[in-house]
Image: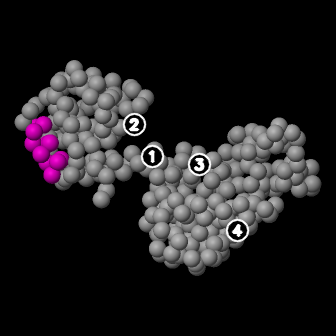
């Protein structure tokens, strides 16, 4: 079952609040109705909701103050807030001063309200799950995507950049960020051109993509070839000619590091041993250890059936 989302309903008008609460509960939402403005902040702090519905139709300055305080709080500012407005208010509403994320006019169309709640929750998940650097889906989306393909003829492919930390140390984080964006574009384009799939960014230099198993190796080859064609431009002439760059190792000593390459672990999801998300990550970690033994970009596929 999908998780039950919690809604904080802030409204002074009891009839409206009571009707709303019943309709929201009928859709499976947990509803916390707050009519006493003096304890709204305390209750929300003690039990943060997933979404806020706030009645602004009465133009009560106390309710507007509550909304402003919530949106000015760094922890709660991200929670979607849907305002209930009289139809005449929408055309002259001060959107800059009253920080709503969405609104619905009174009288309430409940199908529209339920759609706006669903869209607000999905938008919240997309915005805060996506990696801010590459704009690719993040950890939560990655896990959900993997769980969807378990038991099907798909391949989960984990990608990371070899010797990325020492590259960051020498060339700086701005150059490192550009490498991450570059790899994200290469992956996304290769997967799209192959017929489609899922591309995600776990964090740092760790990426994931999911494609049908019969396309996995060809997509990996395309990604490796395109990354290799561009990687030389990330280094100076001396590094390119020597095939390595100097940086400090984990012990703080100067060491030669090969030019950047990538390792890809391919985990088919239709084998009996792959039954949950954790096992996919465990197998991928072992495969990446093998792939990293090569100084060149390469992929390793798990071919064990048991």
Picture quarter containing residue 82? top left
Question: Real-space Cα distance between discs 4 and 1?
Answer: 31 Å
Which quadrant of the structure image shows residue 171?
A: top right
What residue did someone put label 1 on? 127
Q: Are marks 1 and 2 in contact (CB under 8 Å)?
A: yes
Magenta span: predominant SS is helix
Kindly identify which residue carries mark 2. Answer: 78
Q: Is residue 220 visible?
A: yes
List the residue tagged with mark 4.
Answer: 299
Q: Is residue 17 magenta?
A: yes
Give the distance between the C-alpha atoms of the residues marked 4 and 3, in whole angstroms: 20 Å
Residue at position x 78%, y 41% in the image: 250
Mark 2 or mark 3, earlier in chain: 2
- Give the total number of marks visible in the rendering: 4
Q: Which residues are magenta?
A: 16-26
Q: Report whether 227 appears left or right of 32.
A: right
The location of residue 123, given as percent across then percent down, is 38, 48
Q: Earlier in the sequence, mark 4 or mark 3?
A: 3
Q: Which residue is mark 3?
A: 203
Q: State the CA–CA distance, disc 2 to disc 3.
A: 21 Å
Q: Residues within 10 Å of mark 1 (few under 14, many from 20)?
A: some
Residue at the spot x=25%, y=41% of the render?
7
Q: Are marks 4 and 3 in contact (CB under 8 Å)?
A: no
Residue furthest out toward the left: 15
| Comes first in the chain, label 1 or label 2 | 2
- In front of the other: 143 or 174: 143
């Amino acid at each position: 079952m999908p998780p039950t989302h919690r809604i904080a309903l802030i409204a002074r008008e009891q009839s409206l609040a009571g009707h709303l609460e019943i309709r929201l509960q009928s859709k499976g939402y947990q509803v916390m109705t707050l009519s006493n403005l003096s304890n709204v902040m305390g209750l929300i702090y003690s039990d943060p909701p997933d979404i806020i519905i706030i009645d602004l139709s009465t133009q009560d300055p106390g309710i507007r103050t509550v909304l402003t305080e919530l949106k000015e709080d760094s922890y709660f500012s991200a929670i979607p807030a849907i305002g209930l407005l009289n139809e005449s208010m929408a055309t002259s509403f001060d959107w800059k001063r009253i920080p709503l994320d969405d609104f619905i006019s009174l009288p309430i169309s409940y199908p529209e309200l339920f759609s706006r709640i669903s869209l607000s929750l999905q938008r919240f998940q997309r915005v805060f799950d996506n990696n801010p650097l590459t704009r690719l889906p993040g950890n939560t989306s990655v896990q959900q995507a993997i769980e969807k393909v378990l038991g099907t003829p798909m391949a989960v492919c984990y990608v990371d950049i070899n010797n990325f930390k020492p590259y960051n140390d020498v060339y700086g984080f701005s150059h490192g960020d550009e490498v991450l964006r570059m790899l994200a574009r290469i992956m996304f384009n290769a997967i799209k051109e192959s017929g489609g799939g899922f591309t995600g960014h776990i964090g740092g230099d760790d990426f994931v993509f999911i494609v049908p198993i019969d396309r996995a190796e060809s997509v990996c080859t395309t990604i490796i070839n395109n990354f290799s064609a561009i990687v030389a431009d990330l280094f100076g002439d001396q590094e390119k000619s020597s095939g390595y760059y100097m940086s400090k190792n984990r012990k703080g000593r100067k060491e030669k590091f090969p030019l950047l390459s990538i390792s890809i672990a391919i985990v088919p999801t239709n084998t009996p041993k792959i039954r949950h998300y954790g096992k996919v990550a465990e197998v991928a970690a072992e495969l990446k250890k093998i792939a990293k033994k090569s100084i060149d970009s390469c992929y390793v596929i798990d071919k064990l059936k048991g």
